[in-house]
Amino acid sequence: VPSELELIQTFVRATGAAPLVPAGPGDDAAVLAPSGASCVTVDALVEGVHFRRATASLEDIGHKALAVNLSDLAAMGARPRWCLVALGLPRGFRRSEARAMGRGLGGLARAAGVKVVGGNVTRAPGLSLTVTVGGEAPDTGLLLRSGARVGDALWVSGTLGDARLGLLLLESRGNGPGGLLRRHPRLARGTMGRQRRPTARVALGQALAGLATACIDLSDGLAQDAARLAMASRAQLHIRLGELPTSRALSAAIPEPGARNRFAAMGGEDYELLFTAPPDVATQVLRRGRRARVQVRKIGEVVWGRGTVLVDERGRPVRGVHGFQHFTR
Ligand SMILES: [Mg+2]
């Protein structure tokens, strides 16, 4: 079994040699020199809870463990800088396997400008990878969930429901909705890719700082995460399901618009950004989306009240659209 230091060095090397910090890794603690406000988040990926070895490669797991944290920093408008990795390794886990996870994490870390500054390894009954990511607040201030004001427009980035569709396809070995893998293999593989290697909207989050009034990343599905933003802002979100952005893959899998939009609203692990902005800055929102190379779409408004109201394509309230949990369908 390789030593703890060797294993952590695998991850450190995967993000490049130049140290970001005055000291670390290799000492008892990393030493950081933050400029201004820092922003820190942590998330664990646990075998059997968040992934299965049968449907996710070790590179996928390394990538995703960082991506889900980057998504949280994106929702704050922060610039990610460093991360800590904590590995739980089952008996017999090989160095080459740790290296594969390091490659997955390292590829994304380099692209995002993030350095591994330290870590920990422990024996565990199953594989787990816990990543802590820290970043810097922009001069324009951080985005919070609590800033939505009555009259603001509600926006969302990208497309919704693809990662959930990808999970169904992976879990059913291709017998997912609409026979998608058989009829449209390229589209189907795209959704599985979104499930296994999500993209965090880091550039968009930073572009929205100072413009958006509130923001949250979509990890548990639009319906559930919108309710969290509404509660934090002490307002109500009015969401038109007919406006939800959906992909060609989702249209091919679920042709009926009503069913498709409800699926998209409940889809977990989108890692898109849901945000609010005053109605008179719509042009700037669209421009900043283009600059960050991601589509943004207006899907509703902030109104008086509490919670969320979801309306269908004809404006009728929709019930029974709930959140998402792994492996509990
Ligand atoms: Mg989040």
Image: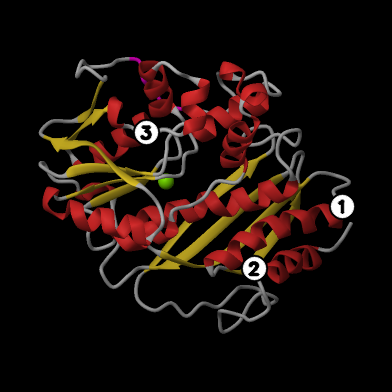
Crowdedness near tag 1: few (<14), some (14–19) or many (≥20) residues, C-alpha within 10 Å: few
Q: Tell me the CA gap for discs 3 and 1.
A: 39 Å
Measured as percent of width and height from the top left, residue 325 is found at: 51, 28
Measured as percent of width and height from the top left, residue 18 is found at: 64, 81
Colour option used = secondary structure
Camera-near label (2 vs 1) is: 1
Give, as a three-letter code, the residue at label 1.
Arg
Residue 321 colored magenta?
A: yes
Q: Residue at x 67, y 22 (%)?
A: 182
Q: Residue 23, relative to residue 189: is it above or below?
A: below
Give, as a three-letter code, the residue at label 3.
Leu
Q: Which mark is residue 222?
A: 3
For label 1, the SS is: loop
Q: Earlier in the sequence, mark 2 or mark 1?
A: 1
Q: Earlier in the sequence, mark 3 or mark 1?
A: 1
* Magenta stretch in the rendered image: 320-324
The residue that mark 1 highlights is 94
Q: Is residue 196 left or right of residue 311?
A: right
Measured as percent of width and height from the top left, residue 63 is found at: 63, 52
Q: Locate the C terminus and report the quarter of the image it occupies.
A: top right
Residue 19 seen from this side: yes
Q: Residue 32, relative to residue 201: is it above or below?
A: below
| Along the viewing direction, whichever of 260 and 103 lies nearer the viewer | 260
For label 2, the SS is: strand
Q: Which mark is residue 118?
A: 2
Residue 77 seen from this side: no
Mark 3 and ligand 1: say if the CB distance to the nearest ligand atom is below 8 Å: no
Q: Quadrant of residue 114?
A: bottom right
Q: Earlier in the sequence, mark 3 or mark 2?
A: 2
Q: Residue at x 68, y 23 (%)?
A: 174
Camera-near label (3 vs 1) is: 3
